[in-house]
Image (spheres, rainbow, N blue to C red):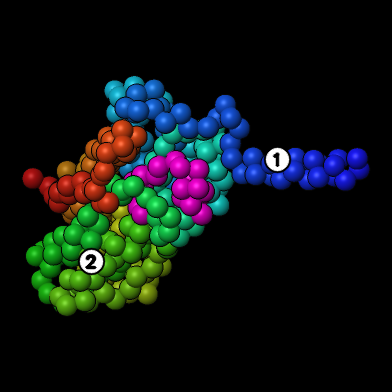
Amino acid sequence: MKKVLLVFMSFSLLILGACSLEPPEWAKPTKKGNGEGSKIGLSVSTLNNPFFVSLKDGVVKEAKKQGMEVVVVDAQNDSAKQVNDVEDLLQQGVDALLINPTDSAAISTAVQSANSLGVPVVTLDRSAEKGDVETLVASDNVKGGQMAADYIVDMLGEGAKVAELEGVPGASATRERGKGFHNVADEKLDVVAKQTADFDRTKGLNVMENLLQGNPDIQAVFAHNDEMALGAIQAINSSGRDILVVGFDGNEDALNAVNEGKLAATVAQQPALIGQTAVQAVKDVLKGEKVEKAIAAPLKLMVKE
């Protein structure tokens, strides 16, 4: 009798251990056939940036139109927090995940967790290095970086001395925008300094102050996003220098700065369209349809008219 009891208890513990890897029954994905009524989890790298606020708004607006519920979480630029956020969304039983990674490598474990539960994942603006992602909806960041470099060459000529403000290390957007920029800059410009400012306006200001002290001959700046570009402009204005600055994103503050002649140009993305397109892609996936592995949103170089 004792042996039977021990076998039963061991079997019970095994079943409980297996169940602990999955969300509770009430929270498991419902697998809606046409997407309507589905619950989508949206993990955003930070909502302390106008670009990602617009991206989030695009998701929420399109999801409402499609009859979907959206649960939004803000990683606050903390990759560890983002992984925990996504695990929590999975426990809530989301039918699909939209992820805007803080770090493309760090998010991989969360993507793989979703894969193990059969929850489809779509990434926005930045990719994930590992795991199965249905599609990446993003601007062509490489092309955008090239557009910025070409504009500087057009304005200042070949050989102009340029500083580069890089985004968050490890983010795919940082790598891709930098790659596109250097495809042109390494041949036609003189990049005298580059340093990360983490896509942040205050850090852009502080880093630019330091770069100006060490490089008095800088003629232009390419910032991987508008927030850093706007911070750089503050530092440049305080120094009394006349330096051409190009940003990337096309957020409202940057477009205003372009129209006022403070920012020379910005490579404008369409974050709301990225969010909208990502929801449409999720709907197709939930319906069992195939989607392209990468969906590009158009870019436009914005200059003062």
Q: Does the magenta stretch include residue 305?
A: no
Residue 122 spot, x, y in % from top left: 36, 44
User: Which label was assigned to residue 181?
Assistant: 2
Residue in the picture at 48% in, 40% down: 74
Residue in the picture at 23% in, 42% down: 270
Q: Taking 258 as reference, is 108 left or right?
A: right
Which quarter of the image is occupied by the C terminus? top left
Which of the pair 220/284 is nearer the observer?
Answer: 284
Q: Residues within 10 Å of mark 2 (few under 14, many from 20)?
A: many
Q: Which amino acid does label 1 sit on?
A: Leu
Q: Is residue 114 magenta?
A: yes
User: Which label was assigned to residue 82?
Assistant: none
Q: Which residue lies under the disc numbered 1?
A: 16
SS at circle 1: helix
Q: Which amino acid does label 2 sit on?
A: Phe
SS at circle 2: helix
Residue in the picture at 42% in, 31% down: 31
Instruction: State which region is magenta.
Output: 109-127
Q: Taking 169 as reference, is 288 left or right?
A: left
Q: Are marks 2 and 1 in contact (CB under 8 Å)?
A: no
